Structures are given as C-alpha cells and as structure tokens.
Amino acid sequence: MSAKIIAVANQKGGVGKTTTTVNLAASLAERGRRVLVIDLDPQGNATTGSGIDKARLEQGVYQVVLGGTDIAAAAVKSESGGYDVLGANRALAGAEIELVQEIAREMRLKNALQAVDGQYDFVLIDCPPSLTLLTLNGLVAANGVIVPMLCEYYALEGISDLIATVRKIRQAINPELEVTGIVRTMFDGRSRLVAEVSEQLQQHFGELMFDTVIPRNIRLAEAPSHGMPALAYDSAAKGARAYLALADELLARVKA
Ligand code: ATP
Ligand code: MG
C-alpha cells in the first residue's frame, strides 16, 4: 500500500507545526506504523527535536530536492522517535534559491518520494511558516494536510488563507490534496476566548476538526531540548497522551 503523505502546514508561525509533526510521528511509530518525517524548514527544529544533530547533517531534504541524492541515502533514524528523518539545517537552505532555476521545481519532492513508495505507511512533512518553494514541494507531494492552530481571535482568518492555498494547489497541480484535519494546539479550555473560538471553529469546519485537542503542556515544550518526542521523554505526560489520541483518530480517519 502507498504511504499516506501528510503536510503539517499553517502559514502562521509558532502554532505547533513542528511539535505536531514530531509527536504524531512518534505516536504513529508507537502504533506500529512505519513513518518518515521530512523537515522542510531550514530552522531544522523537527530534525533537532528528533534527536538528530543538525550541525552534523551532511545530506537532507535539500540535496534530495535538488537531485543530488535519494531519500533512502539521506534519511537517518530517530532513535528516540522510532521513525526515519529526512533532515534540514540552515546550511542547506541555499537549495531554495538554486531550486528556482530547476525544471518542474515544485514536483521535486513528489518525484523523490516515488522511490520509497511502499517503505513507509506515513510520511509527515513539517512545513515552514511561509509559502516558499519548499512548502510548495511539500503540498504538491502530499495527499493530505494537517493544520495545527491556536484558538485565538484571528484564528479563523489565518486558516481561511491556508484553505484557499490548498484549494489553489488542488486545482492547479495536485488534485489529490485534501485537508485531513484541523487540530487545536496549546489548548487551554479554561480561557473563555479559547472556548468561544473553539466553538466557532466547530461550527465553521465541522467534520474537519479533529475531536482530539492538544493541551498546553510543559513536557511538549521541554522534550525537544532533549532531542526526544514527548512520548520518549515522559510517556505519561498529558501532551504525549494527547498526541497518541490524535494518532488513533488519524488512523481511524484515513483507515490505515
Ligand atoms: P514555526 O512556525 O516557527 O515553525 P511551529 O508552528 O512549528 O513554529 P512549534 O515550534 O511546534 O510551532 O511550537 C512553538 C513553541 O511552542 C515551541 O517552543 C514549542 O515547544 C511550544 N509548544 C508547542 N506545542 C505546545 C503545547 N501543546 N504545550 C506547550 N508548549 C507547546
Ligand atoms: Mg516549526
């Protein structure tokens, strides 16, 4: 069976994209699925958060996208996460500029993924908080998008932009692309504003909302500095349990 390829995306910064990618990957691995994480962000947070030293990374997603190497050669194992990582760091970010001159520049990641088809059940792509050519490669390669978001005042506006982007990509290049689900992150149900926005989201997006919400949880913020997903750092933590629940909901949703 082909892998389910999911981009974790939101143009807004700091909404929990990387935290969701890493912890969902670890949770899917815990459930026995074969997972590849692709770090499309030159900040390399998903790489570091998976316990991989980004400073020593020799090959990563940029070499793959530029055609210098293939995924099987460039991916490394996250021991703490139980999944593979196609990493990134700042030194590799020049690819973004080089890529502009390449032919079929937005298809590069999709084409590279064909070589590992069948080796993974899930590919999770951590996107940077902007619509770069790399993000575009992620959205073209993907068949689903998970959108992490905060329940704050402008949330609805931000998410409408992203959904419009997904629609454009679907019409122009990738008819397979759909929104897999929207996940509320850093959730604090005691706040009235959060509860109100959450209610609006339910009304507006209905089925697209994951039932699972990710609470604000200090362990989720601490774990990356130890190079671990929360499940490895403190498996009993509320945040780790929430991402396991999200993985189960995702598995039920995509029937994988
Ligand atoms: P960027 O847009 O910069 O890539 P991002 O969307 O990937 O950001 P994260 O890096 O995952 O967001 O999260 C932003 C910050 O919030 C990080 O310091 C992270 O550790 C923290 N964080 C994320 N989720 C939670 C949570 N549920 N509880 C507490 N802290 C969290
Ligand atoms: Mg990030």
Image (cartoon, rainbow, N blue to C red):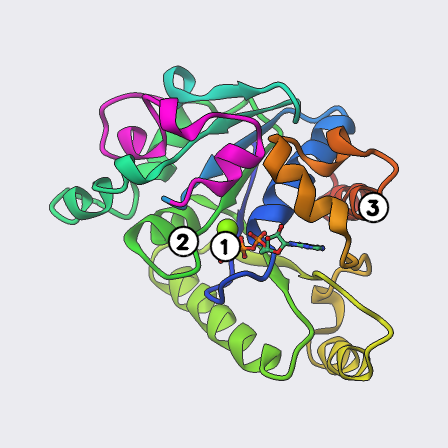
Task: Write the start and end of the magenta stretch as one range.
Answer: 43-70
For the residue pair 79 and 99, the one nearer the viewer reads as 79
Tell me the amino acid under the disc marked 1: Leu
Residue 41 appears left or right of 243: left
C-beta proximity under 8 Å, tags 1 and 2? yes
Tell me the SS state at disc 2: loop
Q: Amino acid at mark 3?
A: Ala
For residue 187: magenta? no
Nearer the observer: mark 3 or 1; the answer is 3
Left or right: 25 in relation to 91: right
Mark 3 and mark 1: span between their CA atoms?
24 Å
Residue neighbourhood size for the residue with mark 3, other residues' Cα within 10 Å, grouped as few (<14), some (14–19), many (≥20): some
Give the class, few, some or many, for how many residues have Cα within 10 Å of label 2's Cα (few <14, many ≥20). some
For label 1, the residue is 177
Choose mark 2 or mark 3, whichever is in front.
Answer: 3
Residue depicted at x 50% and y 55%: 177
Q: Is residue 2 visible?
A: no
- The residue to which callout 3 is attached is 245
* Residue identified by numbered label 2: 174
Quadrant where the C terminus sits is top right
